[in-house]
Amino acid sequence: MKNISLFFDIEEAEKELKTLSKKIKKANEEYFLKDAPSLTDSEYDSLKKRALKIEEQFPELIRKYGISKNVGAKVKSGFKKITHATPMISLDNIFSLEAFSDFIQRLRKNLQQDVFPTIIAEPKLDGIGFSARYEKGKLIHVATRGDGKIGEDITENMKTIPEFKMSLQTDLDVLELRGEVYLNKKDFFEMNQKLTEKGKKIFSNPRNAAAGSLRQLDSKITATRPLKFAVYTWGEVSPRPWKTQTEFFDFAKHLKLPINLFTICKNEKDIENVYHKLEENRATFPCDIDGIVYKVNEIALQEQLGMTARAPRWAIAHKFPAEHAQTQLKNIRIQVGRTGVLTPVADLEPVNIGGVLVSHATLHNADEIARKDIRIGDTLLVERSGDVIPK
Ligand code: IVH
C-alpha cells in the first residue's frame, strides 16, 4: 500500500482510483454476498481511505466512482444476520418407493400403531428456502435458511415479490411462515433472454437464478426478477391455531398466501399414485421440482415421533432420478417458429434422461452456441427441464 501522497495529474489519480474501486467492489462482494472475505478489516479500511483521499482531491471523480457516496450505503445494504427462533431443519432423502415402505414401517413401529397415518405429499420445490416472521400480523423480518440456525436478512428483497405481504389478517403473537422462493421455468428462460440481450451473465438454472435474484444487495434488482413463493411449513408460532398440516394450509390460504400443492394419502397405493403422477408431469410442471416431500399430517403424531440429530422422523424427501445425461451432438439446424423466430436446434444421439428418450435440444440463440463453444461431434451434458438445454 502506497503512502497517502497527493496527485498533480488527474489521469494518474483516476488510474489508481479505478484499481481501488475494483478492489473495494470485490471485497464488498466477498464480505456481503459470499461471506468469504479475502482482506482483513484493516486492509479494507486502508483501501477505502486511499480512495476517499483521491476523491477528496478530485471531486469530479466522485460521480464516476463514488466511493465516498457508496461506502455507507453498501455497508448498510449488506445482509444482516438473523438467528432463527426455531432451526430450519433439513430432511432425510430416499430414492425409491421401497424405501418409503421402510419409512412407514419405522413410523408405525415408533408410534406403536397398526393403521397407516395420514400422509401429506407435496412437490419438493427447487428454489431457496425462506422464513418470514410476523408479530401480531406485522412483518418483522424475512431470512434465508443459511446454515439452518442463522440466515441472512432478505426482508427488503422479499417485499418486492408481488404476492408477499407486509401485514396479515391475524393477531397471533408470533407467526413464522416458511416456504420456498422460486422461478417458473418460463419466466427463467425469459429472464435469461433479457440478461443476454443486455450482455449480462445468465443463470444456469431456475434455482440459481432465484437464489441470485433474492440475494441481491440492491432490492431494486430483485424487483425486476419474476420471483414467486409458496408457503409449506412454519417455525415459531404462538399460539398455534392448527393441529395438522392440512389445517395449516387452510390457515395460510385464508390469509391469501400462496401455498404449496398437496395430496392427502391414506395408504401406500395413494403414495405410489402421487409419485408416478408428479414424476411423469415433472417436465411440464411450471417450476422445477426435485422430488416429493411426505409429511405425517397430525402434529400430535409428529411430536411423538420427534427428531434424529439431523432431521425429523415424521417427514422424508423422495428425490426424483437425475434429469441429465451425456450424449453426442450430431447436427445443429435452424428451426423457424410460428412467429418467424429462428431457434437453433441440436440433433442428439438419443439418450434416456429420467425415463424420457431425448433426441433434440434447443440451443436458444447463436450467442449461446458461440459462448459455450458448442460444435458438431461434441459430447454434451444434457439437462431436461421442460425444454432441453445442453450444458
Ligand atoms: S418441509 C420439517 N416441504 O427442502 C419440514 N421442505 O431437504 C422441513 N423444500 O430445507 C421442510 N419443498 O428448503 C418442506 N414441500 C416442501 C419443500 C421443502 C422444498 C426444501 C426446504 C428444505 C429442504 C429439505
Image (cartoon, helix red, strand yellow):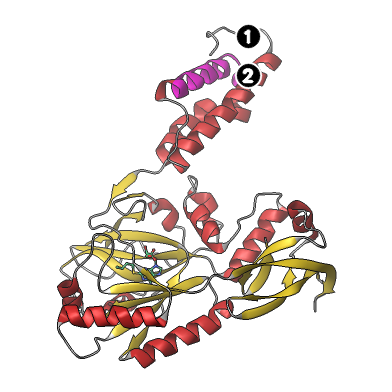
Dot 1 amino acid type:
Phe
For this view, does 141 lie left or right of residue 22? left
Q: Quadrant of residue 209?
A: bottom right
Q: Quadrant of residue 375?
A: bottom right
Task: Please state, as top left, top right, bottom left or bottom right, where the C terminus lies in the image.
Answer: bottom right
Q: Give the class, few, some or many, for how many residues have Cα within 10 Å of label 2's Cα (few <14, many ≥20).
A: some
For this view, does 200 lie left or right of residue 146? right
> How far across and how far down the image is residue 134, in percent?
27, 60
Q: Going from the N terminus, do you reach mark 1 or mark 2 first? A: 1
The residue lying at 31 percent from left, 80 percent from top is 102
Query: To which residue does mark 1 refer?
Result: 7
Q: Are marks 1 and 2 in contact (CB under 8 Å)?
A: yes
For this view, does 78 lie left or right of residue 354? left
Residue nearest the viewer, comparing 337 with 373: 373
The residue lying at 66 percent from left, 72 percent from top is 387
Please say whether residue 244 is one of the residues in the magenta stretch.
Answer: no
| Residue 306 vertical placement versus 128 (above, below) | below
For this view, does 245 lie left or right of residue 110? right
What residue range appears in magenta? 43-59
Instruction: Give the CA separation, mark 1 to mark 2.
Output: 10 Å
> How far across and how far down the image is residue 224, in percent?
56, 57
Query: To which residue does mark 2 refer?
Result: 16
Q: Mark 2 CB in 8 Å range of ligand 1?
A: no
Dot 2 amino acid type:
Glu
Please say whether residue 55 is one of the residues in the magenta stretch.
Answer: yes
Q: Is residue 244 visible?
A: no
Q: Classify mark 2: helix, strand or loop.
A: helix
> How far across and how far down the image is residue 318, in percent?
41, 75
Q: Quadrant of residue 138?
A: bottom left
Q: Classify mark 1: helix, strand or loop.
A: loop
The residue lying at 36 percent from left, 55 percent from top is 145
